[in-house]
Image: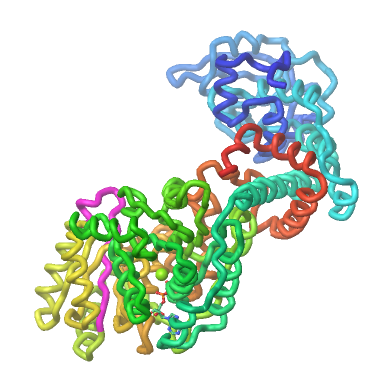
Amino acid sequence: MSGAAFWPTKGSRQATLLARLDIHRPEDLVLHLPLRYEDETRLTSIEQAQVGASAQIEAEVLSSEITRPRRQLLARVRDEAGSEIVARWINFYPSLQKQLAPGRWVRLFGEVRGGFFGVEMVHPRLRLVDKGAPLPQTLTPVYPTTAGLGQPVLRRLLDAALETVPLDEPLPAALRQRLSLPGFAEAIRTLHRPAPDIGAHTLAEREHPAWLRIKFEELLVQQLSLRRAYHARRAHEAVCLPPCRTLTHALHERLPFALTSAQRRVMDEIAADLAAPHPMQRLLQGDVGSGKTIVAAFAMLQAAENGWQAVLMAPTEILAEQHYRKLAAWLDPLGIGIAWLSGGRRKREREAELARLASGECLLAVGTHALIETPVNLPRLALAVIDEQHRFGVRQRLALRDKGSAGVRPHMLMMSATPIPRTLAMTHYADLDVSTLDELPPGRTPVRTRLASTARRAEVVARLKAGCLEGRQAYWVCPLIEESEALQLKTALETWETLKETLPELRIGLIHGRLKTEEKAATMAAFVAGELHVLVATTVIEVGVDVPRASLMVIEHAERFGLAQLHQLRGRVGRGTAQSSCVLLYEPPLSGTARARLKVIYEHNDGFAIAREDLRIRGPGEFIGARQSGLPLLRYADLERDDALIEPAREAAGELLAVDPQAVDKLLTRWLGSREGLLRT
Ligand code: ADP
Ligand code: MG
């Protein structure tokens, strides 16, 4: 198709510009839809043109001149009824003046303004015409474009593409009828070349049936490609790990608390997946503190009781170590060993751990990305758990997956404390099964959140002191300085020094990413043991850190943090039974978005509500961040506004995959072209 006669040759300037818009074939161009439209199907007399509104006038050039010292091109024109208007250009090619020769008839399209020279149009679009020439029959589309590629070129290419690209209908008629959607060809023609009476409002708001059709198809294609990727991965073989209930039962017996019903439900879902002969691909999401770790522990034990290996990978050393301690405390009494691998451990220790894993003597391991970077040999790997999965890139996740022996893919359990709003889970995560912990363990009291401007810092410090002298423990979170890690470190050191000076009666520790592993571990241990009142910390404590006795938190320069980050940080307190509080110190004046973020975190404690707001403020592209290289994002459908289309698109995807694989191929090729292959891993 890209051999079409009108299509620019490969490597030409025009082809390069089109590629910049991700348009590589005439089919891509057909799906390049207008941003808005202009109505050039009507003429307005100068007399009736309204100041502030766009209008098209037809008039004769009376004069044109280039003024100095401010170089401008001024043309005075007069319409048939005898009214005059000035057209003014500030940037122009000299050829423009030649075109505006007195006596020529022109059509000018633009906004009419009251100006220095009387009523005027600044930078109107100009068309040279014969007086009374026929007007266009359809609205004029305005396309998203890039510098150097003008609207007229795009329109001309589209005219040709609409003539030659076959606009086949892949959707069964019954489905279209059920959803009252127009055909693809009709929708495409309507959107590129709409009739003037179409109802400009529904078109602009993207609520016209033609828009709904395209947005539905886009959502459908997203479902299809993600479901195909899901099925492709499922076609691989995995080890069946039926629940033997030897080790898992023993852990149940010794558990110091009763599982929540959400935990029990989720564990059943996972246990069933592990028993199947194809790899699990499950996302476990649950708010901060909902108890994901124990769920992971049970899954790992199910592997171990079958004689297979399981690993848990966490994004930071602090978190990995904490997981290690927690798992060891649960599993040691059962006689189950567990290895701990992190970049910071001494070479000798690490090698001993590696040997235990390679021999198969040790079945379980916890670690940081050291698990994928060092030559870890896991001959019997059957389950990989990734905690705080959004902190890892696609490649790192694949690297962990490929640690298993050849031909056998491990079951994968991805855990996330950044809850994914329902609409996003249903769309962008359609290639995973999702389990949700929607219940917190009993006895938690919601964190009380307060906002305070830095002017009240002394007051906040005084309260912190009072709290600690009553036996409470506190985190003091240092400001995030995105531009410079060195500066962030410096600030953390300064904060620590200042707090020590101001509060000599308190024991204050400092923790940050640059400390040696042992130093970090020692400081954390002192805080856990209650030997420190206050822990000054950078965002290294953001994920997962669990010290139930800590019940106070101050976050400095809270306005610099993102919503998910603030929620994660705040989640470090409120883990015990004491009333916890979190003070968000901010530096006025606040920007609009910073204010919006702080308001959300102040008003909500529930991670799902916060995630919804976050999605609304930032949009899905940012929200899902690193997951996503190669994943098709949505160009036209909007998850919030087009919510009603999502479920039908999911259902239709299931139906099409089952009954009409050719239609599926057609749809994927039309929308994704060669990109589809990226998803097949
Ligand atoms: P997260 O989901 O944030 O990773 P954790 O797994 O760290 O949460 O659990 C938070 C705390 O709650 C831990 O101290 C854990 O031992 C405890 N916990 C987990 N499940 C329960 C439960 N059912 N009842 C009481 N405490 C629990
Ligand atoms: Mg956790």
Q: Residue at x 68, y 10 (%)?
A: 102
In this orientation, which residue lies closer to the viewer: 671 or 292?
292
Q: Is residue 403 visible?
A: yes
Q: Quadrant of residue 443?
A: bottom left
Residue 154, placed above or below residue 404: above
User: Where the C terminus falls, by quadrant?
Assistant: top right
Q: Is residue 48 left or right of residue 487?
A: right
Any magenta on residue 42?
no
Q: Is residue 612 visible?
A: no
Extreme bottom residue here? 470
Q: Quadrant of residue 589?
A: bottom left
Residue 271, placed above or below residue 578: above
Q: Quadrant of residue 388?
A: bottom left
Colouring style: rainbow
Question: How many numbered marks, from 0 up?
Answer: 0
Segment colored magenta: 473-489
Residue 64, given in percent of the width and then of the height, sits at 61, 14
Q: Residue at x 12, y 76 (%)?
A: 502
User: Where the N terminus falls, by quadrant?
Assistant: top right
Residue 224, placed above or below residue 599: above
Q: Is residue 620 left or right of residue 344?
A: right
Q: Quadrant of ligand 2?
A: bottom left
Residue 371, given in percent of the width and then of the height, sits at 34, 54
In this orientation, which residue lies closer to the viewer: 563 or 149?
563
Q: Residue at x 49, y 71 (%)?
A: 302
Any magenta on residue 485?
yes
Residue 233, given in percent of the width and then of the height, sits at 59, 50
In this orientation, which residue lies closer to the viewer: 529 or 62?
529
Q: Is residue 614 left or right of residue 583?
A: right
Residue 345, given in percent of the width and then of the height, sits at 21, 59
